[in-house]
Image (cartoon, helix red, strand yellow):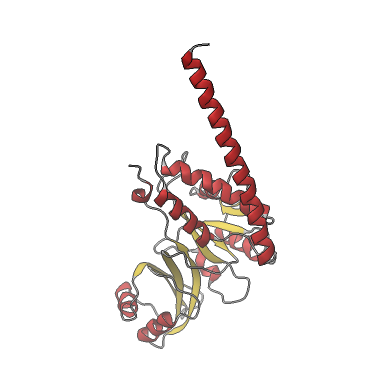
């Protein structure tokens, strides 16, 4: 046997030893994940989007070497998806079209069950009824005549909330429309990750322009990153203003209540619709 062949055999044996160690650590990770689930109880989803965001941010920040960061993130998304499924039933409802199915598969893993629906409203209903653990819906649009988010302007217990934005780490391979984006809804509370955006609705009896909303938010130290509205033609005094802010906010946040007061008595209530950890940027995923 040549010296080169002996060296190759040595390298392959080292790879095998590394694979065994990685496998051992993955099995241990599953055990710890189950222990975490047992300590939390089994009365809800194991999914924790904010925690996952913190993990992926930390790993990409410490990463070095030849493996692309995007590949690292993809591996860990499969690991995280498996961990969620190990802790209880987990399934996804998607609105067909617009890339939602591909984005859901990329985010939640190859083995996660996915069911498609023709309308966004059916997805919201599936999550509300517990027929699906989470739903994936197209990103809200400007002046959408039939927006899905209006079905979530409800403060009743069990109403889904936005918990994540997709893609979280760049467009997945195979996407026909690389600019497609979506949000994830679930019956979960919006939790802080350190870099977050929040969604809420001003339920009002009048229309406000973007400048008025921006000014009211500015007075309480908040910045709107997106705003749109829906007008109920069957109820002339119902205007729903969806606003996204560059900060973490929860139901009852005093800043939002104060901003509503600045807009005037036409605002009947402020309804929090959740939020998401800010996705990784191309710069975050850039390799040195």
Percent of width and height locating residue 231: 45, 72
As rendered, which of 179 and 58 lies closer to the eye? Answer: 58
As rendered, which of 119 and 254 lies closer to the eye? Answer: 254
Establish if 182 lies above or below 66: below
Residue 2 at least partly seen? yes
As rendered, which of 187 and 51 lies closer to the eye? Answer: 51
Establish if 286 lies above or below 162: above
Q: How many marks?
A: 0
Residue drawn at the location 61% of the way across and 51% of the way down = 29
Percent of width and height locating residue 151: 55, 68
Percent of width and height locating residue 185: 55, 62
Residue 115 at least partly seen? no
Establish if 150 lies above or below 96: below
Residue drawn at the location 52% of the way across and 63% of the way down = 163
Q: Residue furthest bottom?
A: 265
Q: Is residue 162 left or right of residue 117?
A: left
Establish if 78 lies above or below 217: above
Where residue 40 sits, quadrant-wise, is bottom right
């Amino acid at each position: 046997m040549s010296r080169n062949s002996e060296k190759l055999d040595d390298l392959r044996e080292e790879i095998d030893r590394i694979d065994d160690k990685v496998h051992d650590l993955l099995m241990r990770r599953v055990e710890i994940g189950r222990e975490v689930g047992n300590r939390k109880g089994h009365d809800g989803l194991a999914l924790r989007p904010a925690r996952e965001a913190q993990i992926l941010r930390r790993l990409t920040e410490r990463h070095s070497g030849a493996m692309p960061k995007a590949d690292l993130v993809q591996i860990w998304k499969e690991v995280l998806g498996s961990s969620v499924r190990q802790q209880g039933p987990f399934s996804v409802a998607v609105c067909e079209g617009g890339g939602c199915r591909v984005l859901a598969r990329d985010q939640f893993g190859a083995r996660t069950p996915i069911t498609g629906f023709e309308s966004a409203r059916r997805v919201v209903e599936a999550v509300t009824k517990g027929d699906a653990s989470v739903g994936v819906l197209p990103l809200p649009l400007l002046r959408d005549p039939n927006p899905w988010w209006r079905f979530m302007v409800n403060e009743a217990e069990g109403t889904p909330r936005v918990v994540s934005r997709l893609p979280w780490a760049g467009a997945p391979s195979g996407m026909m429309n690389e600019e497609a984006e979506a949000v994830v809804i679930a019956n979960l509370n919006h939790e802080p990750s350190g870099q977050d955006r929040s969604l809420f609705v001003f339920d009002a009896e009048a229309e406000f322009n973007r400048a008025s909303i921006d000014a009211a938010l500015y007075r309480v130290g908040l910045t709107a990153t997106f705003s749109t509205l829906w007008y109920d033609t069957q109820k002339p005094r119902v205007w729903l203003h969806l606003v996204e802010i560059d900060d973490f906010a929860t139901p009852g946040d005093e800043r939002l209540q104060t901003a509503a007061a600045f807009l005037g008595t036409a605002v009947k209530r402020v309804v929090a619709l959740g939020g998401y950890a800010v996705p990784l940027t191309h710069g975050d995923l850039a390799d040195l």
